[in-house]
Image (cartoon, rainbow, N blue to C red):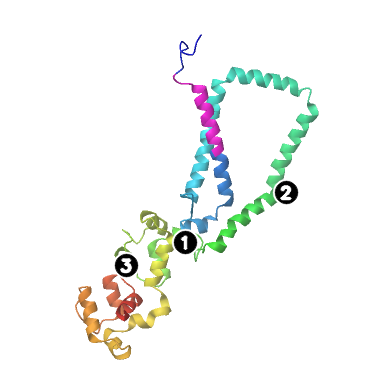
Amino acid sequence: MTAGNRKEKKWHSRGFVAFLMALSFVGLIFSGIILYIVPPGRVAHWKNWTLLGLTKTQWESLHTNLGYAFLVFAIFHIFYNWKSLYSYMYRKAKHAFYLKRELATATVLTLIIVIGSAVNVPPFKTVMDIGDYLKNSWEKKLQSPPIPHMELYSLKKVVEDLKGDPEIALKYLNNRGIKVESVDEKLKNIAEKNSTSPEHIYDLLKERFPGKQIMGLGRMTFGELIKKQDVSEEEIKHLFSKYGVKMDTNMTLREFSDKIGKTPYEIWEEMKK
């Protein structure tokens, strides 16, 4: 029968399942290697760490789903090739009867791996120690959060820890282009919604509520700036006019910053330009 006369099969289910098994297996190995070296969650989630465009959570999801997919494809593979597999395993089982030492050695070796991993002794412990070293080495390059898993804190909790007002923080972040609907939103959710990291949100909040670092400047009125910091009244008028705020030299920089969504130091830097 010539190639032209031969009817070509439109769909080969066995081949399709075999390809799925092979590809999912490769993906499973690759994602497993990635998860072996990724930074700890407290760092990865705080910095919004990514590798090849995927976050740690996405790599974990990919690895898990590929594992289940491989299992499902393996079941289909057995179903489509049951007769061949049964015949193969039957022959091998008969042959194994004559390979008692090899079978016993393989069984013992497998048990050593299982037990050694469970009780965490070398060299199995060494493998895990290397993985921990690689994971923790990221902390030298990436800054950890002030508190582990702080990304799970609500905006209200974070701001209160910074001795600030949550409602002012809400307005401030929105004015800085960070969309926040409620002070009860978690830093992680705010960051995801705005395509940034929890660390960036926290840095913005520290700018607004930096504590003693700029407390003196925030308490100063614009009248005091004119007297003590050599700022002209015309510069003050221009600043109020620019942001549409009624001129008041008795207003503090903190009060002004609350109205326009900037920090006292940002206002100060703007006046010095």
Q: What is the C-alpha distance between the residues marked 2 and 3?
A: 54 Å
Query: Of callouts 2 and 1, which one flags the residue occurring earlier in the amino acid sequence?
Result: 2
**x 52%, y 42%: residue:** 63
User: Alpha-carbon distance for marks 1 and 3?
Assistant: 20 Å
Which label is found at residue 150?
Answer: 1
Image-quadrant location for residue 74: top right
Which of disc 3 and disc 1 is earlier in sequence? 1
Q: Does the magenta stretch include residue 100?
A: no
Describe residue 139's horizontal placement relative to residue 159 as left or right: right
In front: mark 2 or mark 1? 2
In this picture, residue 126 sits left or right of residue 138: right
One can see residue 235 in this view? yes
Q: Is mark 2 on a helix, strand or loop?
A: loop
Q: Where is residue 10 in the image (x, y as percent from the top left)?
A: 44, 19
Q: Is residue 116 placed above or below 160 in the rendered structure?
A: above
Q: Which residue is tagged 2?
A: 123
**Contact between labelled residues 1 and 2, with CB atoms less than 8 Å apart:** no
- The stretch of residues the image draws in magenta is 10-26
Is residue 21 magenta-colored?
Answer: yes
Q: Residue 124 appears at what percent x and percent y?
A: 70, 47
Residue type at the position of mark 2: Pro
Number of residues whose C-alpha sits closer than 10 Å to that of mark 1, classed few (under 14), some (14–19) or many (20 or more):
many
Residue located at (58% from left, 41% from top): 29
Q: Which of marks 1 and 3 is in front?
A: 3
Which residue is painted at 65% across and 53% down in the image?
130
| SS assignment at label 1 | helix
Instruction: Tell me the kind of residue under disc 1.
Output: Met
Q: Answer yes or no: do the residues labelled 1 and 3 have beta carbons within 8 Å?
A: no
For label 3, count other residues whose C-alpha is less than 10 Å away and answer few (under 14), some (14-19) or many (20+): many
